Image: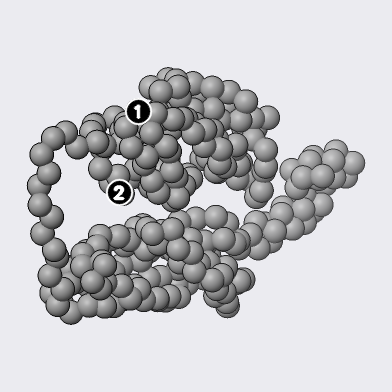
Amino acid sequence: MSIWKTIRTATGIVPHLSCFLALWAFTGSIAQSQFAVTGAALSADPTNYNGPCPGVIKFNGKIAANGQGEVQYQFIRSDGAVGPVQTLVFSGPGTKPVSTTWTLGGTSLPEFAGWEAIKILAPNPMESNHADFKLLCTNFQQPTTPTKPGRVKQADITSKRGIKVGNKFAPWGGTLKLDKTDAFLESNGNFAFNISYDVVNTGSVNAGPFANRFRSDMGTLITQQTAVSVNASSTEQINTQGYLPQGEHQYKMSLDDDNAVAESNEGNNTFTVTIIFNP
């Protein structure tokens, strides 16, 4: 039985002010005990590395919480690597620092652009901003590649059908109306949905691995796939899951979000859909 149902039942049996106040204080204490992460941020140092390799990029961040409890988190990277699960213990409301490093660069990787972020696992799912950086090695000379005559074969990544959330489908540019019956999970007022969309490679060469990201108009990352591959002239159906905020929002799907694939058409990789979610 929920807290509000408990209040209605109790006040219906004993309609006294003292009983109502006691229940009100009880529910207030429960609300205060709902420990949650309220923010996470990360920055790269330096954001532009120009020097001998391998080079080290340091990442310094902060995690904020609203009370006492344990926070589980891990670092995620643009290359698909995921760090071990770590724990922060909060004795009360406040902010705690976190940090990590990434060593990279060499003869096979003289330059690189990437990012790292904090992924909160518990008590509530959350992802920080992407701490972007660029690396250029000065102690390795890139070999020059002779230009070959003729047409270069390339991939072309796009999506043709649209997106399915829960049991409802909409073409790109359309609108989906959802309620809590469309979600497969409800946890602490958060609703998780099954999400499915198609990725098509209309080009003449295989594409991948590359990353797709689905974000809300508030900049929140709903879901991402970091190792997608699609063969030439083929279609892959991506099935994933994510938490959606309540209300009406516009979402953007960005295929090959890191521009890892050389494509014949770079202008057909982003799509939008409007989702109205009222539990």
Q: Are marks 1 and 2 in contact (CB under 8 Å)?
A: no
Identified by mark 1, the residue type is Thr
Left or right of 37 on screen, residue 209: left
Q: What residue is at 64 percent from the left and 35 percent from the top?
A: 183
Q: Is residue 32 left or right of residue 217?
A: right
Image depth: mark 1 or mark 2 in front: 1
> What residue did someone put label 1 on?
202
Q: Which residue in the protein does label 2 denote?
A: 260
SS assignment at label 1: loop
Furthest residue toward right: 13
**Lower sequence index among marks 1 and 2:** 1
Q: Residue furthest front?
A: 149
Amino acid under label 2? Ala
Q: Specify the quadrant of the image occupied by residue 189.
A: top right
x 19%, y 37%: residue: 152
Q: Is residue 36 positioned above or below 255 on the image?
A: below
Quarter residue 137 falls in: bottom left
